[in-house]
Amino acid sequence: MDNKHQLLFAALVLFCEAERQYFFYSNVSTWDQARLHCQICYKDMVSLTSDNIQLLVNNLSHDYWIGLRKSLDNNSLQWSSWSNGDPVIFQNWYPGRPILSPPKDPVINNYNTYILPTPTPTPTPSACGCCCDTPSSPTTFYNDNYTDYPNATVNVNLLSTTSATTRSTEVTTSNPTMGTTLFTGVTAPSNESNHTVTDGYIADPCIAMLSCGLWYERVCTMLLPYICYEDRFYGNANISGVTLHNASLSWASGPADINDYRVEVKAKYYSRNVTHSSLNYTNLTYQLSNLTAGTLYSIQVFPIKCERDLNPENVSFYTKPDIINNLKITDISLNSISLSWLPPNGNCDFYSVQVTGGPDETIQVNNSYVVVANLTSGGLYRFDVNAEVKDQSIKGAPQNISKYTKPGIVQNLTVHSHTNDTVWIEWKPPVGNTSGYRIEYFVDSNIRTHSTTKTTNFLVNGLPQGTMIHFTVFSLVADLSVDGDPQELTGLTNPGSVTDLQLEPQNTTITVTWKAPTGKYSNFTVQVNLTDTGEQEFLGNTNNLSSIVSNLKPGVQYTVSVITLNGDLLSEPRKQTVYTYPTSPESLQIVSFNQSQVSIKWKPPSASGNVPLTYSVTASSYFINCTKTELYPYQTKNTNHTFAGLTTGTKYEFNVSVQAGSLASLPITISQTTAPEIKVLIMTLECASNISLHCEDDTVKKSVKEQLSQYLHGSLQDFKIWNVILIPS
Ligand SMILES: *[C@@H]1O[C@H](CO)[C@@H](O)[C@H](O)[C@H]1NC(C)=O
Ligand SMILES: *[C@@H]1O[C@H](CO)[C@@H](O)[C@H](O)[C@H]1NC(C)=O
Ligand SMILES: *[C@@H]1O[C@H](CO)[C@@H](O)[C@H](O)[C@H]1NC(C)=O
Ligand SMILES: *[C@@H]1O[C@H](CO)[C@@H](O)[C@H](O)[C@H]1NC(C)=O
Ligand SMILES: *[C@@H]1O[C@H](CO)[C@@H](O)[C@H](O)[C@H]1NC(C)=O
Ligand SMILES: *[C@@H]1O[C@H](CO)[C@@H](O)[C@H](O)[C@H]1NC(C)=O
Ligand SMILES: *[C@@H]1O[C@H](CO)[C@@H](O)[C@H](O)[C@H]1NC(C)=O
Ligand SMILES: *[C@@H]1O[C@H](CO)[C@@H](O)[C@H](O)[C@H]1NC(C)=O
Ligand SMILES: *[C@@H]1O[C@H](CO)[C@@H](O)[C@H](O)[C@H]1NC(C)=O
Ligand SMILES: *[C@@H]1O[C@H](CO)[C@@H](O)[C@H](O)[C@H]1NC(C)=O
Ligand SMILES: *[C@@H]1O[C@H](CO)[C@@H](O)[C@H](O)[C@H]1NC(C)=O
Ligand SMILES: *[C@@H]1O[C@H](CO)[C@@H](O)[C@H](O)[C@H]1NC(C)=O
């Protein structure tokens, strides 16, 4: 624990102790001149301690005045303090020195033979057995030429405070109000010969350090080089109010006796000294102006003492970078936006691009363009771009620009449904954002129609039938600044129905003709069904406007429908019904008959197969003089019929035909005489002849009977069931 405390204490002492700088003057001077010069231009003459002596000795080439003399001033205790007031706590005398009292026997003194010190650098005692180690301290040394100083500028105040201690020096002030004076030097010592007088007792000696580091008293008027020291000055400069071209510099005042400063402003390719005329000594400030924006400036404020720059107060700063120019969007894609701009006036080291709109991010780029990637398509982004300096201590004012990324392409665009004059399309939203959609469509006329919607479907109506419609769908962003890529789709309206459908039947064929619809079509489907049962008899496609359907059954009602095709699209069917021409039934037979009824049966025409047919049945009888009387017109779906209520013994003709709508087939016919009921018809014939009894003659009778039969036969030829009997009256 104790050790630690000691270490810490030692460190603090070292830290707090100002770094001391030593200045060696090789030009010779009396002790008082040397002290005055040291006090004006430095702190004072050197004072020696065990710490610094070795370092200093290392640099000695001959004797030097140090800041010690027997009586510093009239009041203080002799040998008690250094010229700077430090107590003398360390001594390093040449053996036998100093001689504190005058010799009592001058004869003895005269008798002695001493090697007298020579005026200028003379290592006196040759037996200087110093062996000093090489110093490792950072203490700095300066070798100044004293001749530089006769005309040195020093401060008036400084002179006034030190004038009390000057001895045998002359100082002239040339310009007191400006605060600078000319230090013209010191008068030469009046008595040179006294150096050589004695090596013995000196009443009021000044002390010199021999080159080996030991101390030796000398007559103060002796001309020797000397060593001054000064505590290294540390101060801070500050910068405030930094703008594009201006800044305020302020600094701490230098050591107490300093009143002049030099400000050195440096930047890359730029350097300027500002001297006292521009500086404000009241508050130690300087307004930097005309700076270049975005540039690193290093400022050093040198306190000046005797034309000597002290340790500078340093500060460096960047001026604010200027605003970037001409920020613009150079490219937009689904997921990225490219920006470019022109560099600001002045300098800058890089740029920051702040992206807002998605997850916020800041991108730093060295060039004046950037591609901001990984954005959401159709999203609104804002970019704030500002110039930056290397340490980012100050930012340029940002410029901003906002832009949407390109919205995505709509997905799965399809036709939802269509009729002969509408097409309804639908789609899925694109990946990312979109504010709506624009639909462009055109039919053959090539006139594009535009429409926007927020929904994902669109209905177009009033279209021509059987036409192709070309759709293009774009996704949109709110400000319509950029569209998504187009997605295309072709839709068709249903074709129109045929018109003027005409059917021309034959017994086994139907000739179907129609007129084409307006609009496009590819071909037609003709379908023929039995009307009764719906059974399909024919189905075929054709490019023509007619079709002959054959192999049909005669006498049957068919439904013919014609549908227009256009690609896969179908029109409404156009329908007509028609009967084929009927053909006659077959195998008509009399099944039975009696006096008043006749039953007949027949077979359907074999070509008609099993299709139920309607038959028209009639009976007709012929009577005398061939008058035909139609009886019992009747329609039936059966293939037999019984006629009742017929006249006995009458010959009937029965017709059966196939009835198809208004058409009827040729009938087939069969005759039958109903069973007779025997009746006697008595006719009285009166025979009148010129020849008597001629009527009685058998031959005549026979002739009359034959004539009568002949006559009746002519009238009743079909009535076979009769007989003529002559009965004499
Ligand atoms: C001292 O002055 C001489 C002559 O003017 C010059 O050569 C020498 O470099 C100077 N020394 C210093 C340390 O300035
Ligand atoms: C010092 O001043 C004198 C006259 O004032 C001048 O002749 C001399 O050149 C000056 N010396 C220097 C080093 O400036
Ligand atoms: C040397 O100094 C002494 C007094 O210290 C004086 O009496 C003497 O005259 C001086 N010698 C010369 C040569 O000036
Ligand atoms: C500023 O002054 C210093 C010291 O006098 C000098 O070394 C430097 O070259 C000067 N700079 C300019 C830009 O004048
Ligand atoms: C120096 O600065 C002070 C305070 O900022 C101001 O009042 C004064 O006018 C300035 N003097 C000059 C000469 O600019
Ligand atoms: C100048 O310095 C004085 C004293 O240090 C201070 O009171 C004053 O406010 C300063 N003026 C400015 C403008 O900084
Ligand atoms: C700033 O620079 C311009 C041109 O270099 C010059 O005309 C102007 O006087 C300067 N202003 C200041 C205050 O230095
Ligand atoms: C885009 O994002 C993915 C994952 O978040 C990442 O791996 C990729 O590097 C990013 N691309 C760019 C150009 O930033
Ligand atoms: C688009 O259609 C494909 C295939 O039918 C399907 O896999 C996909 O999920 C659909 N996309 C959307 C967004 O519905
Ligand atoms: C489309 O069909 C309907 C009946 O389905 C019909 O009323 C309309 O006239 C047709 N439109 C056109 C343009 O033919
Ligand atoms: C249909 O009529 C034609 C004459 O027009 C005839 O030759 C043909 O035999 C008839 N077919 C049937 C099944 O009746
Ligand atoms: C009718 O058109 C459809 C669809 O275009 C096609 O598949 C079919 O082969 C065509 N038929 C004829 C007979 O041209």
Image (cartoon, rainbow, N blue to C red):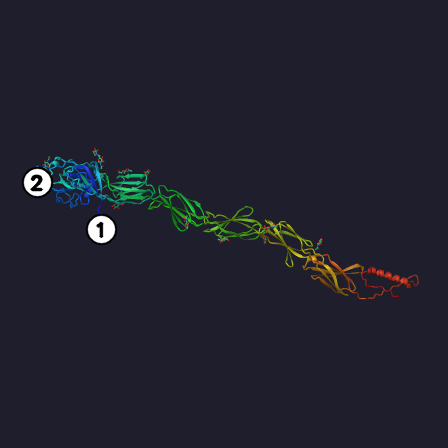
Query: Quarter containing ligand 5?
Result: top left
**Drawn side of residue 410 relative to residue 226, left or right:** right
Foreground: 162 or 177?
Answer: 162
- Outermost right residue: 692
Task: Mark 1: give few (<14), some (14-19) or many (20+) Cα within 10 Å.
Answer: few
Pinpoint residue 347: horizontal percent, then vertical percent. Answer: 35, 42
Quadrant for the C terminus, please.
bottom right
Q: Amino acid at mark 1?
A: Leu
Foreground: 274 or 125?
Answer: 125
Quadrant for the N terminus, please.
bottom left
Foreground: 613 or 690?
Answer: 613
- Please say whether residue 41 is visible from this viewpoint: no
Q: Amino acid at mark 2?
A: Pro
Task: Mark 2: give few (<14), some (14-19) or many (20+) Cα within 10 Å.
Answer: few
Pinpoint residue 565: horizontal percent, then vertical percent. Answer: 59, 51
Instruction: Please tell me which residue is depicted at 30% across the width and 39% down the height of the picture.
Output: 271
- Report the label total: 2
Distance from label 2 to label 1 (Cα)?
Answer: 50 Å
Q: Is residue 75 above or below residue 504?
A: above
Question: Which residue is disc 2 drawn over?
Answer: 103
Pinpoint residue 638: horizontal percent, then vertical percent. Answer: 70, 62
- Please say whether residue 315 is visible from this viewpoint: yes
The answer to which of marks 2 and 1 sits earlier in the sequence is 1
Q: Which mark is residue 468?
A: none
Q: Which mark is residue 7?
A: 1
Pinpoint residue 683: horizontal percent, then vertical percent. Answer: 85, 64
Look at the numbered discs 2 and 1 and tell me whether their residues touch, using CB distance below 8 Å. no
**Drawn side of residue 118 relative to residue 659, left or right:** left
Secondary element type, mark 1: helix
Secondary element type, mark 2: loop
Q: Is residue 189 above or below residue 350?
A: above
